[in-house]
Image (spheres, grey):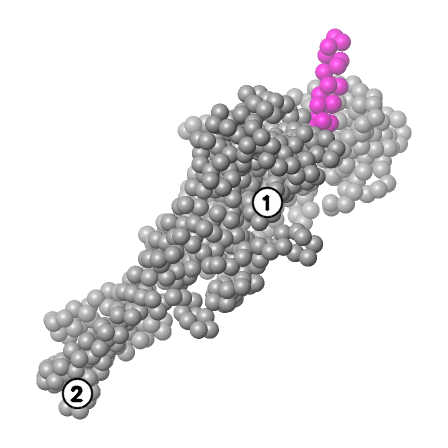
Amino acid sequence: MAAVTAQVVGVCALVGWLSFRNGEAAVRELSNRYIHELTLRIYERLHSYVSAPVRVIEADAHAMRSGRLDLEDLDALAQHFWLQMRTDPTLGYLSFGRDDGAFIGVQRVAGGRLVLETADGGPGSAMRSYALDEAGRRGALIRSTPGYDPRKRPWYVAATRADRATWSDLYASFSAPDTTFITAVVRISDPYGRVRGVLGADLIVSQLNAYLRALTRHHPADVVIIDSERRLVATSVETPTVRVGPDGALQRIAAGEVEDARLRGALSTLEALQASSGERVDDMQGTLETDDRALVVELSALRDARALDWSIVALVPESAFMAHIDQTTRITLVLCLGAVLLGILVAFFVSRRIAAPLRALARKARRIHEGDLDVTFEPDTEDEIGELNATMAEMVVGMRDRDFIRAAFGRYVSPELVDRFIADPSSLALGGQLVRVTLLMSDLRGFTRLSEQLAPQAMVRLLNDYLGAMTEVIREHRGTIIEFIGDAILVVFGAPLRAEDDAVRAVRCAVSMELRLRELNAMSAEQGRPELSMGIGLHTGDVVAGNIGSAQQAKYGVVGEAVNLTARIESLTLGTQIIMSEDLRRVVGDAVVTGAHRVVRVKGISQAQSIWNVRGVAGDPPLDLGAPPELEPVPAELAIDVHRLDRHIVLEQPVRGRVTALVLGGLLVELPERLDLLSRVELRMELTPGRRTQGAYGSVQDCVASRDAGRFRIHIAFTTLEDADREAIDALRQRPRRAR
């Protein structure tokens, strides 16, 4: 009975505690909603405030570039600015600084009046301010401030360094140093890229302080706006956001230097929290514990595409919302004490019935929480506890299946693997099997040279477009991508999923990849991007396929001599070419259209290999790469230096000879030394006066002794060729035809 009584008392105490926690959670939700709505209201106001000047200057910039606004007619610009300022009261200043130092601007001053400010840009130029009447005409001179040059102002400098509309940093007004601005600016350039001037629209940042103070006057909240360097932009607290340094220049105040002690402590705690996370936090809502109080805080980022990067920080004391929780807690405790007496009686009868099975369920739930899914549930009653047993049994089965699928997703990336795994999990238990597969390896030609010519961003975009297109083709043909090796792709057909048409499908995939590359090159040409050249090698052989790695991390892979031979075959391709082995040709038979073949010896393979050039594949629909280009020799007489390649190293000592003929895709060369078949060489020759080839590489296709003693006639096929060199060679090949 004492145990039951203790349980009932504990339950009542738990109810009281839960009541307190629920009330606390409700109040916290209310405070979070309040601070979120406050932040959202500020965000919408600021977003509207900063969007207006950007829209105006972008429209004016378009008018200037199209000639509808004359940059030389400053009076017309002043009238145009005056009309825009009258139309949009959120604008604080519209101005234009010309590259010769001339300046024109219309400013909104106290009382909403508009003032014209102008400078002629000559030596000792001064900023002159004039009153404007109701028609926008220039009136009396208000003041003249000497030494003004717009080209030295922060907003002008910010625009010249950006290639699109942007924002300047916070700076003080030239004529009123106690007023701070931030300017949306855009550079105006002529068709040759020379800067003609800068168009700007100012926001009076110091007005934001008044807006924030008015917004929070009747609310228990503090609001601070800071930039990406944690410097103050505006605040609802009566504290300076800028100061004048010893040299008279305007200095920004960092968040940790705020004069208000409470606000400084809150911002310092927030910065410490962000620093502990190891990365910048842009959006956050939660409770912040400072030295003397708890604060409900919301951080919201305000950014645009023009380098504006502010953060809105709203802080509300948690104590402002927690007062009525104490009263609710007292009422709850009284009710709980009254319920204890009744609960003791009820608990006496109920506890014996439910305590034992519930404790058993609790132990099993704890084992599940600790990761033990070998728990069994055997419902022995038909009441709610028995139903709970059955439900938890179903839950454990679902968790086992979930973990099993999660492991598969972490180890296999091909969609076919996942689909087959869900349908038949046992089909993926390879564990390292010897299987016969068809391998495909593709590689881009001259990709290292392209990476040296293109900017990193352009290079990554080009590579991503290529790999994305090839991956789509491979998946259409149900190939399994083993890995990406830079710009190379290794694909297997026949593991882990095997089909009768694996070999033909692999060849069909290779032909489709080349056709897709032609489409990609056509689109790249329209965008001014370089053309890609891809070689593909195909081979059928035995490999060991299975899970490779460790218990912590694994991948599905294939290993064996067939993989190495596929890579060697791919290395024999010239430009965009598909080559398959004799083993694969015997498997596919007449289903594949082949061109010429040759017998080669490849490094690391003892036996000579017959390789075939693939020209098409039968099927529905049939795929055809078209007829190969004919090698029509065109006589030529050019001096040439041939540098042998040792792996990827160019040997400095060249073999000097002469080019005797040009053929499509290569050269016929006469040299005093023999070159090994399929050896890689660098070619240096003068195709046009004063210009030698740059980055021209080839592969030796044939080498026979000449009639002249000590001379050899060699056919070299290009593997890499610059566009300019290719155009020069094509011009030389066309010259004899025009003569005929």
- Give the quadrant of residue 183: top right
Of circles 1 and 2, the one toward us is 1
Residue type at the position of mark 2: Thr
Q: How far apart, in angstroms, are the residues tagged by discs 1 and 2? A: 78 Å
Location of the C terminus by quadrant is top right
Foreground pick, 313 / 546? 313
- Give the quadrant of residue 613: top right
Residue at the image point whose x is 85% and y is 37% from the top: 654
Q: Which mark is residue 5?
A: 2
**Percent x, y of residue 164:** 57, 36
Q: Which residue was labeled with disc 1?
A: 176
Foreground pick, 109 / 9? 109
**Percent x, y of residue 487:** 59, 43
Location of the N terminus by quadrant is bottom left
Residue at the image point whose x is 50% and y is 28% from the top: 133
Residue at the image point whose x is 78% and y is 22% from the top: 661
- Return the residue found at the far bottom: 2
Please tell me whether mark 1 sits on a helix, a strand or a loop.
loop
* Magenta residues (range): 718-740
**Percent x, y of residue 434:** 49, 55
- Check if residue 725 falls in the magenta segment: yes
Q: Residues within 10 Å of mark 2 (few under 14, many from 20)?
A: some
Foreground pick, 85 / 501? 85
Residue 197 visible, this orientation: yes
